[in-house]
Amino acid sequence: MDPTTAMYVAQGIHGLAYGMVLFLVASGLTLIFGMMDILNLAHTAFFMLSAYFCYQFLSMTGNFWVALLLAPVVTAFFGILMERFLLRKIHAFGLMSQLVVTVGVSLIILASVKIFWGTESLPVKIPPILSGLVTIAGMEYPLYRLFVIGLSLVVLTIMALLLYKTRLGKIVRAAVSDPNMVNALGINIPLVFTFVFGVGTWLAGVAGVAIAPIVTVFPGLEAQMGMDAFVVVITGGFGSLAGAFIVSIIFGLLSSYGVQFVSSLAPVLMFAFMAIVLAIRPMGLFGERE
Amino acid sequence: MMNKKLQGILWAGLIVILILYPKVFGIYYTNLFVTFAVFAVYSVSFNLLLGYTALFSFGHAMFFGVGGYGTALALKHIAGLPLLGAVGIGLLSAIVFALILCPIVVRVTGSAFAMLHLAFGQLMYILALKLRGITGGEDGIGGFPIPPFSIPGVVSINMKAPENFYYFVIVVLGVSLWIMWFFTKTPFGQIQVGVRDNAMRIDYLGFKVPQTKAVVYVVAGAFAGVAGSIFALFQNLIAADSAFSIFVSFGAVINTLVGGLGSFFGPICGAAIMQILEELTTRYTDRVELVAGLILILVIMFAPMGFMGGVRILKQKWLARSASGVKLEKAS
């Protein structure tokens, strides 16, 4: 294979890996929105928090797998606390209050991260098994990126099975379309909400750990990832998992090829894509009309 | 009648205080007041969207920044531009920018509107950082000449003196506030409130909802542009972090919520409260984010109607008490 094609493929892998991580974050966001009508602006703050937890667990135990297991769970715990003690109390106040409270939480997380870990970039080492390159069909790929793609696929498969093959998934899907009705049928909807919120933040947490070794961990991570994830959810359509998936992959590829060809304007490409989609379909690619 | 007179006296008193303010408090507090006035007008323009039309924008800083950059660029590149011309260019650029955006944004509501603005706001922030040739990147545009305020043949006032600049700012922002206040009192302002309360009904009554939203959007953007333009003149510098940053957008939200939603003067009170709080907190701690986050949560949890809401409740209680007092007197 000639070097040019190899370069294209390598960029494609980069884009795919980023797109998958993006989807992990965006899926949690869109799941929470679809179910609870809450746009959790603190979602990417949890993503960043999990990356910091990953750094912390890694420096305490030295084992990446422990960090991968624990960091998202601890993050989800904080998410559940937030749902239980803040969002549930203000649910009656309407959309704007929820947005503002989630912004407040994200500011507090940002501030606490700066207090506990400082503002400098913290490196997270790729575990030895996953570092290095792997050769497939005469081409070398960075193993960790392939691992990220694989991990995301596994997590998503589990989520899909949970959502479409279990009783719990059935309840969640029913609650997405009409929470009051499900509540009337004798199912404890507040508990289901808390569960979904926990799963959503857990997904953000997994994404945070997955991305920690690729980029360094620093407080700007939230803003960097945050915008992309929100743009994905808007463009894909609120509450639509399929839309989020497709747009995530498109954005991942756009950003990696964009950096290659028009490096200074790469961030703009995404917004241009979003503007075009919204100009044609205001509710997003797969969104339902309000 | 009595009420009108009292109001007249109050306004006259306010004007006297505003005129005497820099002489009494000195330069530091004068500059603080200018900052407050800029953010008060900016927050009021934001409240035109949120409080009067229920359009919740998380990216109002775009207009603030576009106005600021418009003025700064104009002063940098056009020699001999008069002061009001520079402010006018800031205003105009914000209007043009709002006109470009409004076909997309008036079609969405609620979360989508908020998110779209968050995204566009970040886009402008990134553009301001990346288009180094035009915007100067992180350093921004600074050191542009500040022309004197002059009416040819009549008067020319040097604007580099903080006191003169203070009066200029008070007049420009005062007029802006008055125009916005007037705007909400027109029949069109009533349609605007109608769109907030029941958009479908307004639609059935034969008014055009998206077009109404677009007009309000452009007006709100224009005055945010004026505030940004004054801010650029005041600092003699406009940079991405002070103009387009997400915290500038959140600032408008915080001011409006703290002051009270849906009341015209609420955001002004909010801006004053937040300015004082910021002044106090930065003296003791540099954790501005922590304080801002806590305030947001506490306000929503315990005072969802903000400062003006609290005032209104107190007023009602007081009125109820005096009313019952009157009844008692009659009964006896």
Image (cartoon, helix red, strand yellow):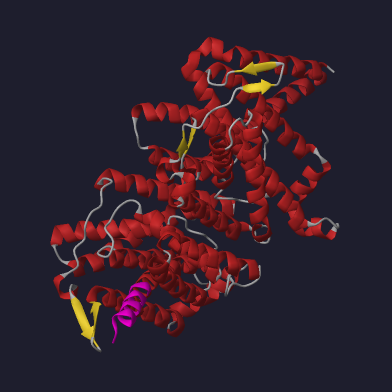
Residue A9 part of the magenta-drawn span: yes
Q: Which residue is nearer to you in this view: A83 or A266?
A: A266
Dominant SS in magenta: helix
Q: Which residue is nearer to you in this view: B48 or B63?
A: B63
Q: Does residue B297 appear to the left or right of A155 in the view shown? A: right
Residue shown at the point (54%, 43%) measured from the top left: B65
- Locate residue B22: give its quadrant: top right
Q: Does residue A150 appear to the left or right of B145 in the view shown? A: left
Q: Quadrant of the C terminus of chain B?
A: top right
Residue shown at the point (68%, 32%) measured from the top left: B176
Which residue extends farthest front?
B79
Q: Which residue is nearer to you in this view: B124 or B130?
A: B130
Q: Is residue B307 visible?
A: no
- Examine the rendered structure and indicate whether residue A279 appears above or below residue A159: above
Residue B239 part of the magenta-drawn span: no
Q: Position of residue B128 (x, y in %)?
A: 48, 49
Q: Start and end of the magenta stretch?
A: A1-15
Q: Position of residue A55 (x, y in %)?
A: 22, 58
Q: Which residue is nearer to you in this view: A139 or A143?
A: A139
Which residue extends farthest bottom?
A137
- Examine the rendered structure and indicate whether residue A103 appears above or below residue B243: below
- Examine the rendered structure and indicate whether residue B259 appears above or below residue B57: above
- Examine the rendered structure and indicate whether residue B92 appears above or below residue A208: above
Q: Position of residue B297 (x, y in %)?
A: 47, 44
